[in-house]
């Protein structure tokens, strides 16, 4: 499972996206997130799909690796699709017993599914797959730096988010090891009803939580042993700075936003 799911995993590379400033990628990811959640027309979703496809090519990562970031939310995607599929109005296109699928419900379900997929893919490509957790923390701290005047713990918040992203793949690998160990002792997670399977996962969650708390305690001890005192007077190994590539990419994102909101007005029927 740890090798199949790449949620939160950074993939080293030397692509165009890898070389961008993390602040540019973070702001762009937020912009694409807003565009994905606010777009319902087919032409807007088509523009976003082309942009995400372009990001895939610019990242120089394997397409299969990028698409695997969708796996952790497959149940959410299925629930969102079915919920919108059976709650639509309009002309009936399929009916069998109590199952009724209407044209409006089918169209809306497809659009919701596309929106969520584009949302996950764009954020995964720009943030986790092409940006290290340390650079993500630096970008968050830099963008929130004006809040330091209000005594807001900017560095601590960014560090916690960085650590959380860093340990997602570690926890997934740990869960895989626990599942194999429990299966070798006779545990079965594939048979029985849903309640029985849920009870079986207790044997995974308990040692996983214990391991997580132990790992957090070890991390705190290591940070104290190295005299970690937060962001005050700290220096960085890699100093983030904007370049011409960031300006070019920012212009591309602005054009994307203009196209997403302007094209539905120009082509209202789509």
Image (spheres, grey):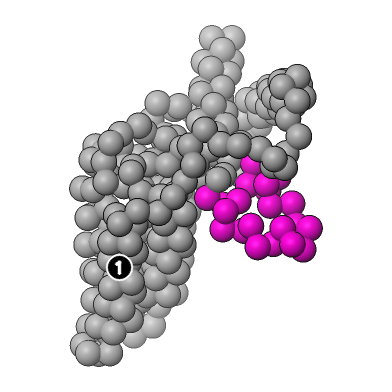
In this picture, which residue range is highlighted in magenta? 139-160
| Magenta span includes 155 | yes
In the current view of this chain or complex, which residue is farthest to the top?
185
Q: Position of residue 245 (x, y in %)?
A: 29, 54
Residue closer to the observer: 162 or 260: 162
Q: Position of residue 57 (x, y in %)?
A: 21, 48
- SS type, badge 1: helix
Q: How many marks?
A: 1
Camera-side residue of 116 and 79: 116
Compared across the picture, whether 161 is left or right of 253 comes to right
Q: Is residue 118 left or right of residue 207?
A: left
Residue 91: percent from left, percent from top: 29, 84
Quadrant of the drawing holding the C terminus: bottom left
Image quarter of residue 99: bottom left
Residue 100, magenta (yes or no): no
Residue at 36% in and 33% down: 11
* Quadrant of image for the N terminus: top left
Of 177 and 131, the residue lying toward us:
131
For image coordinates 55% across by 45% down, the residue present is 138
């Amino acid at each position: 499972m740890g090798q199949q799911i790449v949620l939160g995993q950074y993939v080293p590379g030397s692509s165009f996206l890898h070389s961008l400033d993390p602040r540019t990628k973070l702001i762009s990811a937020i912009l694409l997130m807003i565009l994905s959640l606010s777009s319902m027309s087919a032409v807007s979703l088509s523009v976003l799909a082309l942009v995400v496809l372009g990001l895939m090519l610019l990242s120089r990562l394997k397409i299969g690796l990028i698409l695997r970031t969708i796996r952790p939310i497959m149940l959410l995607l299925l629930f969102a699709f079915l919920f919108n599929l059976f709650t639509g109005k309009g002309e009936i296109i399929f009916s069998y017993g109590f199952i009724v699928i209407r044209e409006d419900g089918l169209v809306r379900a497809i659009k919701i599914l596309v929106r969520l997929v584009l949302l996950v893919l764009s954020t995964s490509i720009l943030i986790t797959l092409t940006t290290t957790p340390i650079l993500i923390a630096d970008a968050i701290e830099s963008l929130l730096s004006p809040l330091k005047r209000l005594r807001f713990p900017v560095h601590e918040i960014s560090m916690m988010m960085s650590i959380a992203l860093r340990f997602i793949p570690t926890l997934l690998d740990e869960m895989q090891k626990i599942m194999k160990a429990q299966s070798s002792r006779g545990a079965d997670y594939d048979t029985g009803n849903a309640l029985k399977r849920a009870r079986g996962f207790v044997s995974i969650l308990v040692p996983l939580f214990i391991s997580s708390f132990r790992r957090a305690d070890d991390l705190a001890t290591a940070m104290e042993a190295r005299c970690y005192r937060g962001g005050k007077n700290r220096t960085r190994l890699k100093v983030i700075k904007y370049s011409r590539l960031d300006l070019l990419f920012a212009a591309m994102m602005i054009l994307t936003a203009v196209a997403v909101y302007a094209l539905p007005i120009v082509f209202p029927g789509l």
